[in-house]
Amino acid sequence: MKMNRRHDCRLFLCEGKMEKYEPILERLEKTAKQYTNIAPENGQFLSILIRAIQAKYVLEVGTSNGYSAIWIASALKQTGGQLITLEVDHKRAAEAQAHFNEAGLTNIVEIRVGNAIDEIPKCEPPFGLVFLDAEKNEYLRYLELVLPKIRSGGIIVADDTVTMRNEMLDYVDFVFNTSLLNSVDIPLDDGIILSYKN
Ligand SMILES: C[S@@+](CC[C@H](N)C(=O)[O-])C[C@H]1O[C@@H](n2cnc3c(N)ncnc32)[C@H](O)[C@@H]1O
């Protein structure tokens, strides 16, 4: 059975007071290819995860125009949490900031403009959830930098793990073979690897 993506999102967005974000998300979905945004169901997945673990501090690596950050921040609004999102491209970061302003999420999201390799060491722990969605062949470097900053029981979500797996084989090898993490492949849209920090 084919999943009705928008119906699925609406169910979530009508809970609480989240319907405010729907027009922005719908608009951004029209340019999702250009901005390489996650699929709506991956946004829904992140949102459920954040609320389920009651995450307070989330780090996103790779903001683009802020589509996934709006999903994350809208969930953090319910948990009373905060998001730091990292983007190297100034133009995209400015577009994302405009979307956060429009969504009324500026008190929840802080965008830091710069290379994640330089920015992650400056980020304050402890993170309950980290979402990796920038350069695929740098996932392992991002993880090495951020792992000490993730609390025990924290979660790492890596995107594009089916469609771009060949670019992150070192990451895949690490997360499935270290005793520090328990990991599972989830074939949701472009694929996710979900890792739990022991
Ligand atoms: C796949 S897009 C992110 C999409 C976004 N998570 C969403 O779903 O809306 C990847 C983004 O990572 C950014 N990026 C690439 N390398 C980076 C780096 N080293 N540090 C920070 N951002 C980076 C790119 O400029 C691009 O905007």
Image (cartoon, rainbow, N blue to C red):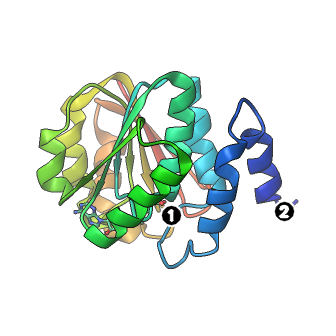
Mark 2 or 1, nearer chain start: 2
Residue 4, given in percent of the width and then of the height, sits at 83, 58
Decide which of 34, 52 is in the foreground and name it: 34
Residue 65, given in percent of the width and then of the height, sits at 44, 64
Name the residue at 64% across, 45% down.
44
Circle 1 packing at 10 Å, graded few (<14), some (14-19), many (20+), is some
Q: Quadrant of residue 46?
A: top right
Mark number for residue 13?
none
Circle 1 sits in a helix, a strand or a loop, which is it? loop
- Callout 1 amino acid: Val
Name the residue at 59% across, 52% down.
42
Displayed-image quarter of ligand 1: bottom left
Q: Are marks 2 and 1 in contact (CB under 8 Å)?
A: no
Decide which of 25, 180 is in the foreground and name it: 25
Residue 188, given in percent of the width and then of the height, sits at 62, 55
The residue singled out by tag 2 in the image is: 2
Circle 2 packing at 10 Å, graded few (<14), some (14-19), many (20+), is few
Relative to residue 54, is residue 82 drawn left or right?
left
Q: Which quadrant of the figure contains the C terminus?
A: top left
- Callout 2 amino acid: Lys
Ligand 1 within 8 angstroms of badge 2 C-beta = no
Residue 114, given in percent of the width and then of the height, sits at 18, 59
Q: Does residue 53 appear anywhere in the picture?
A: no
Q: Which quadrant of the figure contains the N terminus?
A: bottom right
Mark number for residue 162?
1
Q: Does residue 82 appear anywhere in the picture?
A: yes
Name the residue at 68% across, 62% down.
26
C-alpha separation, residue under disc 2 versus residue under disc 1 = 19 Å
Q: Is residue 193 above or below residue 149?
A: below
Task: Report the residue that reaches farthest toward the bottom.
Answer: 34
